[in-house]
Image (spheres, grey):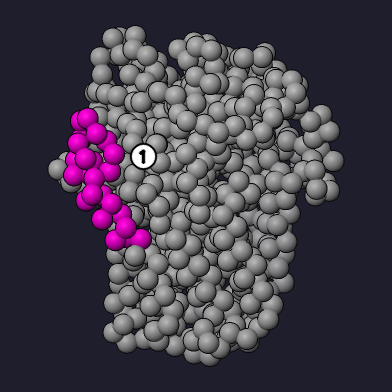
Amino acid sequence: MSAQKPMLTPPPLPVDVESWKRLPRHEKIRPLARDWVENGVGAPAPIYLLYVLKLIAFAVGGLLVLAATPGIGGVTDVADWWHEPIVYQKLVIGIWLFEMMGLGGSFGPLTFKFLPPLVAPLHWFRPGTIRQPPWPRVVPLTRGDRRSGVDVLLAAVAAGLMVWLLASPGSGPVPPGASAGLLDKQVVLALVVTMLAIGLRDKVLYIASRADVYLVSTVIFLFPYDQMMIGLKLALVAVWVGAGVSKLTHVFPYVVATMTSNAPLRPKWFKRAMYRDPVNDLRPSRFAFGFAHSGTVVEIALPLVMLFSHGGTVSLVAVAIIVIFHLHIISNVPLAVPNEWNVYMLAAAIFLFWSHADVAVSDLSNPLLIALLAVGVAGPVVLGNLRPDLVSFVIAMRYYAGTWPASLWCFRGESWRRLSEDVTKASGLADEQLERIYGADYSLVTRYRMSTFRSFFPAGMALNGLLRRAVDDVEAYAIIDGEIIASAVNGWNMGDGHMHNEQLLEAVQRRCGFAPGELVLVHVESQPLNKNRMAYRIVDSALGRLEAGTVPVEPMLKRQPWDDAPVPVTLTGPTTAPGALLDPSLSEAE
C-alpha cells in the first residue's frame, strides 16, 4: 500500500466499513445507492483523465493514419481531403481495429479492468482462454469452449487485414469529385469472411469488435460507389433509430438518472434533480423522464431529417444537433465508456449527411444491397426487440436502453477465487486487482457498488428479489454481478448478459467442478419491447436449471435499489434433471 500513487488515491469510502460489513446484503446497498446519486461509481478523478487522454490519442493517431493515405495530401491539408470516400472507409476500419484490440469500449477501470487496464487482446491471442460459439450444435467446426491456435490465427489475420487496408492506397475507379480510389475490394472481402468465421467460433470477440456497426459498413463497401453511399447512410440511420426505438419504455429514464450521477462534469444539484427524492426514493423524477425522452426524440427524428434533406440549412442544423447529442453522451462518461464509437457516429453524420448530403436514398436500386439492409440490418433490430433472448442487445441496437439482460453469480464463501486458480485468462477478477491496489475493504465496497448500480434498474431489482429463490442463505454467498465475471473470464464486457449466461457457466464448471450449491447463477433476460415481463432462470452449475419463469416489470418500477422482498413470478416450465446442465459433446472442439 505504501507504493500507491497519491494522485490515484480514491475518494473516502462513503461507509464505515467495519459496521457496514455486518449489515445484510440489501442494507449494504442502501448507503451506496444514496452515495451514487452525487458520486456515481466513486472513481478517483485521474481515472477520468485517463479516458480523456485516450480519446485525444485516438483522434490524433487517427488523423495521422488517414493523412498518410497516398494521393490525398498531408495533415496540413485536412480541409482538402476529409470528404474523400476512402477517408470514411479507413475511419470505419480504424475504429473497428481499435475496438477489436480492446482500446475502445470495455477498456480500463470503469469496466473493472485495473491491472492491466487493457485485457481483450491478451485474451484473444492466448490459447486456452474461454470462447463462446453462438451455435455450436448447428455450425460445424465450432464446438468447444477453449480458444485454440485456429482462433488466435483468425484474430491475427483479421487484425492484419485491417492494418493492410489502413496502410493501402486507393484502387479502382476514382469516385466523382474524389482524388483517390477506394479500398481494394478483394482485401475487404477477405476481412469480411474472416470476421464472419470469428463470429461463428466466438460471439464475444465478434460483438466486442462492434461488428454490428463496422462489419455491416464494411460489407457495404463491396457495392458500387453510388449504391455504397446510399447503403452507408441507411445503415447509420438504422443504428440511431433502432437505438431510439428501444428506449421507448419506462426503463430508459433510469439509465439517464444513474449515468448522469456518474458524470464528473455535472453539478450535484443537477444530479439530485434526476431522482424523486435523492435520499428515500431513488426512482427517476419527472425531470429525468422528460430529459431522457427528449433525447429519444432527437435520436429517432433527427437522423430521418438528415436522411431526407439534401443540404442547406435543414441538413446543417440536423447534423449539428446530432453532433451535440453525441458530445453530450461522451461528456457523461457512461459505464463501458464507448467514447470512440460516439466519435465515429458524429464524424459519420458530418461526412455522410453534410459533405455528401446530395446522395439521395431514392436512388437505391441494387437488390442485393436492399436485401442486406432488410435482413442483415433491420432484421436483427426487429427480432432483438421482440425476442431479446435470441439476439445480443448490441446487435439489436438496444444500446443504453436499460432493458439489458443481467445476471448474478452466487459463490458460496470464497469459492469465487477458484476462477483464478482453474480458468485460463488474462487478468484476475476485479476484486483481486483492487485488493492489490487499495486493499480488501475497498475491493469489497467496489463489488457492492456494481451491485448498487445494477439495483437501480428493473432487471437488477428482479435479480435482488429472486436471490432467496436461488440460495438458502444469501449472506453465506459472495454475490458478484455477471459483468465483473465476464470482464475477467471473457476478457471483455459491455452490459450484455448473454456473455455471462448458462453458456459461460458451463465453461467455468468444466474447469472448476463446483459442488452442488457452491455456484448458482440467477439470470434475467431483456424485457421485450412489446411485453411487460422479463424471463428469468436459476441454474446450479453442478445440478442444472433449478427454476425458470417470468417477472412482471410493473412492480419493479415501484421498488428501491435496496429492496430485497420476494418478487412475483410465474413459472414457465419444468426444471432440468440433475446433471443436465453440461453437454459433454460440446466440451471438445472439432
Q: Residue at x 36, y 26 (%)?
A: 563
* In the rendered image, the vertical position of residue 139 relative to residue 508, given as above or below: below
> In which quadrant is the N terminus drawn?
top left
Q: Residue at x 57, y 61 (%)?
A: 382
Q: Which residue matches tag 1?
A: 557
The magenta stretch is: 271-296
Q: Is residue 444 left or right of residue 589?
A: left
Q: Quadrant of residue 503?
A: top right
Q: Is residue 262 magenta?
A: no
Residue placed most toward the observer, 198 or 531:
531
Q: Residue at x 36, y 72 (%)?
A: 302
Q: Quadrant of residue 340?
A: bottom left
Residue placed most toward the observer, 138 or 580:
580
Q: Position of residue 378 (x, y in %)?
A: 58, 66
Most distant residue in the bottom direction = 176
* In the rendered image, the vertical position of residue 183 relative to residue 281, given as above or below: below
Q: Secondary structure at mark 1?
A: helix
* In the rendered image, the vertical position of residue 175 relative to residue 295, given as above or below: below
Q: Is residue 302 left or right of residue 465?
A: left
Q: Position of residue 48 (x, y in %)?
A: 31, 42
Residue placed most toward the observer, 492 or 2:
492
* Amino acid type, residue under disc 1 in the picture: Leu
Let me know if residue 496 appears in the view: yes
Q: Is residue 282 magenta?
A: yes
> In which quadrant is the C terminus drawn?
top right
Residue placed most toward the observer, 464 or 40:
464
Q: Position of residue 553 (x, y in %)?
A: 44, 41
